[in-house]
Structures are given as C-alpha cells and as structure tokens.
Image (tube, grey):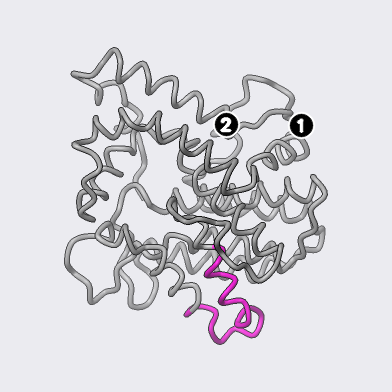
Amino acid sequence: MDDCRVQLANLVDTRDPKAVRDEIHTIAGLMFPRFDVAPFDRAYSDVIALFRGNYPSYRSCNVRYHDLSHTLSVTLAVARLMHGAVEAGQSLSEKDLNMGFISGLMHDTGYIQQTSDREGTGAKYTQVHISRSIAFVQDYYRNDPAFQNDLDSFRDILLCTGLNTQVKSIRFGGATVELLGKILGTADLLGQMADRYYLEKLPDLFDEFAEAGITTFAGPLDLLDKTQGFYQMTLKRFAEELDNTLRFSRFHFRKRWGIDEDLYIKSIEKNMAYLARVVTLHRENYTDHLRRFARMTKE
C-alpha cells in the first residue's frame, strides 16, 4: 500500500471497537506470532462496558471529547508505537505489550462517574482524571497475579499523559516502564490530534474545560485560535519530555502497511492547515466549516 495519498483514517475505523481490537491483535501477532490475547481482550471488553454504562457501579461515559473513540484511538496508537519500537530494535516482552495496551485502554477511565455520582458530568474531574484513572487500573489488577506487582509501573506509565508532567522527574521501575510511559504520553497526543474529527470535537473539549473550572480559554473560538500554539508545544514535548518516541510510528507504517511515512504527523498537519484557514477566513461562521461534526456517530 505504498501510496502517498493514503490517509490514517482509512486504515482502521477507530469508532469501531471490533476493528480496533482486530488490528491490535494483528499488530501483536507481528511481534509475537503466538501472542496470548486473553489478558488484553478481557481488559478491552471491560473498558468498552465501562464507557457504555455496562460495568458494575459506574455510569456510562458522558463527556464528548474524552469518549470511547478517543480511548480506542490512543490504544491503537500505543500498539503501533510499540510495534515500531520493536522494529527499531527495542526489546519488549509479551507482558510489556499487555501493559502498554492496558495503559492505553485505562488512561482516561478517570472521567467515568460512579453510579452514586449524579452531579454534572465526568468533565468535572478533568484536573484529577489521571489520579482517578490510576486508582481504577490499580484496583482492577490489585488481586490479579499476572499484574498485581506492577501497580506502581501502571501509575508511572499513566502519569506520562499529564501535559504538565516532567517525565524526567519520574523514578520509573526500569527502562522498559519508562519507554512504555513515553509511548503512552506520545500516543495520547497523537490519538486525539490526528483524529479525523479533531477540529469538530474541540468545542466539546472547551465544554469539558468549562465544567472543570478551567478558564484558560474565553470560548470555543479562542480554543481554536490557540490550537496551533498547542501543536507547537506538543512538538516540543515530543522532543524534550517524550524522547522523540514519535519516531517509532514510521517503522510501524512501513512494516505493517508498506507506507514509508509518518501518517500521524501527516494527519495532524492536515488538521492544522485546515484550522488555519477556518480561523483566518471564517471566524464569523466557523462552525459551518466544521461540518463533519453533524455526521459524527456519538458513542
């Protein structure tokens, strides 16, 4: 599939849980032909149940930006980066792969409210969602013999998704845990900014910020105006805090699809170019130029 016109969104539909699960199975099989998918599949099914309101003691996801499709996009990006890392000469075990997958799946569980919590939406937890997500994954595996000794590692991996986290200050349990953390931190940014619907979902992100009491942006248009700057900050974070883990994506696309490009950066730059046109030429009716929003299938 060596075609410069290929788009990231056309490879796997990240709004289709089965398609994402099957692709992750394929990627795992490229690294370990007899990879045991059972631990991943169990967590995958439970996280989907959680977001859909079918997990005991929890409500369904009621935030529109950090939704199930975002979690699926990030988990797929984690799988791609881990595969790329292996292709680039990094050593990862089957357990490492599962820890990476699980971290992607559970990194935003902190947005989900318990059934007893009826006030507002999960967006109110924006500023503490990472600690809540860590608590969820640690509770989930506390009595699991396969992962109960890795609870601190899960904590450190999830901490890498915080935009203000100084990754270099984290005392990781080893080089592999550090790599997984940097992969997740990178995948979290790639998964959202490269999404086909990223621009359409930014007003939803503003709503989440507003409910959480974050006053950085005057309104949705102000957030759109500042997104170019956010992208530049993201590139700096990739380089300075996340050890340029982004470089592994190209190894994956070359091996898996025969495409010698970084489709994540290509997709993000396409989003940024369109955003620049919208905020420059269509400020008065910018929502009319984000028409995919009306066609989106909400989880």
Q: Which residue is drawn at 57% across and 42% down?
A: 238
Kindly state the secondary structure of the residue where label 1 is placed.
loop
Label 1 crowd (10 A; few <14 / some 14-19 / many >=20) = few
Q: What element carries label 2?
A: helix
In the image, residue 299 above or below residue 13: below
Work out which quarter of the rendered image holds the N terminus and state it.
top right
In this picture, is 146 found above or below 207?
below
Please say if the residues under marks 1 and 2 sit with CB atoms less than 8 Å apart. Answer: no
User: In percent of the image, x 38 and y 69: which residue is there?
Assistant: 54
| Above/below status of 225 relative to 134 | above
| Distance between mark 1 and mark 2 Cα atoms | 17 Å
Q: Nearer the viewer, residue 92 or 72?
A: 92
Query: Which dot marks residue 258?
Result: 1
Image coordinates of residue 39 in percent, x first then y, are: 64, 71
Residue 267 coordinates in the image, percent (x, y): 53, 29
Q: What residue type is labelled 2?
A: Ile
Residue 292's label in the rendered image is none
Identify the amino acid type marked 1. Answer: Gly
Mark 2 lies on residue: 265
x then y, percent, for residue 216: 25, 43
Q: In the displayed image of the protein, which residue is found farthest to the top?
A: 281
